Amino acid sequence: MSSLPFVEVRVLDERLHTWGLPAYQSADAAALDLHACIDHVLLIAPESPAVLVSAGIAIHIGDPGVAAMILPRSGLGHTAGLVLGNSVGLIDADYLGPVSISVWNRNPHGTDPIRITPGDRIAQLVFVPILRPAFRVVETFSRATERGESGFGSTGSGPPPERGA
């Protein structure tokens, strides 16, 4: 097993020394939790535009074979409706700027706003390997597949899930 890469981290918000630097919350966790580095309570109304929230850090990955992805915390997305405004945030190995989290309240209009308090853990950061293949331009592909050019839904799907199940 190869050694794990180091990622340089700059702390941009000193409150993280109190709240805790991004950390894995269990021995086998895949991602680090990110804190909302905001100065006051943030209320995000349902269906309002996405809001950028500082994570209070900047990172330098430095290895083009690695990228970081910002993902929603599953509990907040499922129970509260807090998701990422861009679904997934991607941080390239050569990016040196502040890490920001685009958050959005996916709940329907008329429901309560989502409340984010300074220091809340609102997203997670996972590091993933990146493959960068070279393209080979061809007139036809080198082999046929059973699926061929059949697109959306062509591999079949079971019956739709029951509502409320």
Image (cartoon, rainbow, N blue to C red):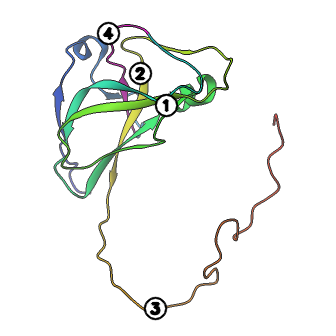
Q: Residues within 10 Å of mark 1 (few under 14, many from 20)?
A: some
State how far apart marks 1 and 4 are (Cα): 21 Å
- Nearer to me, 62 or 109: 109
Q: Closer to us: mark 1 or mark 4? A: 4
Residue where numbered disc 1 is placed: 73
Locate the N terminus and report the quarter of the image it occupies.
bottom left
Q: Amino acid at mark 2?
A: Arg
**Crowding at label 4, few (<14), some or many (≥20) Cα neighbours within 10 Å?**
few
The answer for how far apart the CA atoms under marks 3 and 2 are is: 48 Å
Residue 142: image tag: 3
The residue that label 4 is drawn on is: 39
Q: Is residue 40 left or right of residue 11?
A: right
Question: Does residue 138 appear to the left or right of 98 in the view shown?
Answer: right
Mainly helix, strand or loop, the magenta region? loop
N-terminal-most mark, 4 or 3: 4
Residue 125: give x, y in percent of width and height.
36, 37
- In this rendering, is residue 110 above or below 156? above
Q: Earlier in the sequence, mark 2 or mark 4?
A: 4
Secondary structure beneath dot 4 equals loop
Real-space Cα separation, disc 1 to disc 3, in angstroms: 41 Å
Residue 26 visible in this rendered orientation of the protein: no
Q: Secondary structure at mark 2?
A: strand
Q: Contact, CB < 8 Å: mark 2 with mark 1?
A: yes
Say which residue label 2 marks.
121
- Rendered view: 42 above or below 2: above
The magenta segment: 31-41
Residue 134, by quadrant, is bottom left
